[in-house]
Amino acid sequence: MAAAAKLRLSAQGTVTFEDVAVNFTWEEWNLLSEAQRCLYRDVTLENLALISSLGKLLTLTL
């Protein structure tokens, strides 16, 4: 499913952490600078906190 179509569906229903998460391959991750990795971590944690505040139960696999 195209990202735009998925976002339209999400706008009509619920939003999950996976809807807002950005996933990198190991190759992509290794291309990021330390500052970019820290920014990614900070934004991901903020998104997780915001989604969690909506009262949805989350199960994360790290």
Image (cartoon, grey):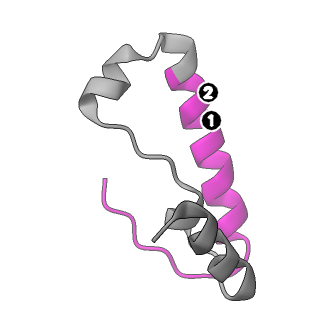
Q: Residue at x 73, y 87 (%)?
A: 12
According to the picture, the residue beneath numbered tag 2 turns out to be 39
Q: Label 2 near label 1: C-beta < 8 Å?
A: yes
- 51 in the magenta segment: yes
Q: Residue furthest bottom?
A: 13
Task: Give x and y (percent) for residue 22.
Answer: 50, 47
Frontmost residue, 38 versus 2: 2
Q: Residue at x 37, y 15 (%)?
A: 31
Frontmost residue, 13 versus 61: 13
Q: Residue furthest left?
A: 26
Q: Amino acid at mark 2?
A: Leu
Q: How many marks?
A: 2
> In the rendered view, would you say 49 is above or below 59?
above
Q: Amino acid at mark 1?
A: Asp
Q: Residue at x 73, y 78 (%)?
A: 11
Q: Which mark is residue 21?
A: none
Frontmost residue, 62 versus 16: 16
> In the rendered view, would you say 56 is above or below 60?
below
Q: Callout 1: helix, strand or loop? A: helix
The Cα atoms of the two marked residues, 1 and 2, are separated by: 5 Å
Task: State the image quarter where residue 32 is shown.
Answer: top left
Q: Bin the neighbour count of mark 1 within 10 Å (Cα to Cα): few under 14, some 14-19, many 20 and up.
A: few
Task: State the image quarter where residue 38 is shown.
Answer: top right
Q: Is residue 22 left or right of residue 10?
A: left
- 47 in the magenta segment: yes
Give, as a single range, the part of the protein colored magenta: 37-62
Q: Callout 2: helix, strand or loop? A: helix
Task: Give x and y (percent) for residue 39.
Answer: 61, 27
Examine the residues drawn in magenta and state their main secondary structure.
helix
> In the rendered view, would you say 36 is above or below 41?
above
Task: Give x and y (percent) for residue 41.
Answer: 54, 35
Q: Which mark is residue 42?
A: 1
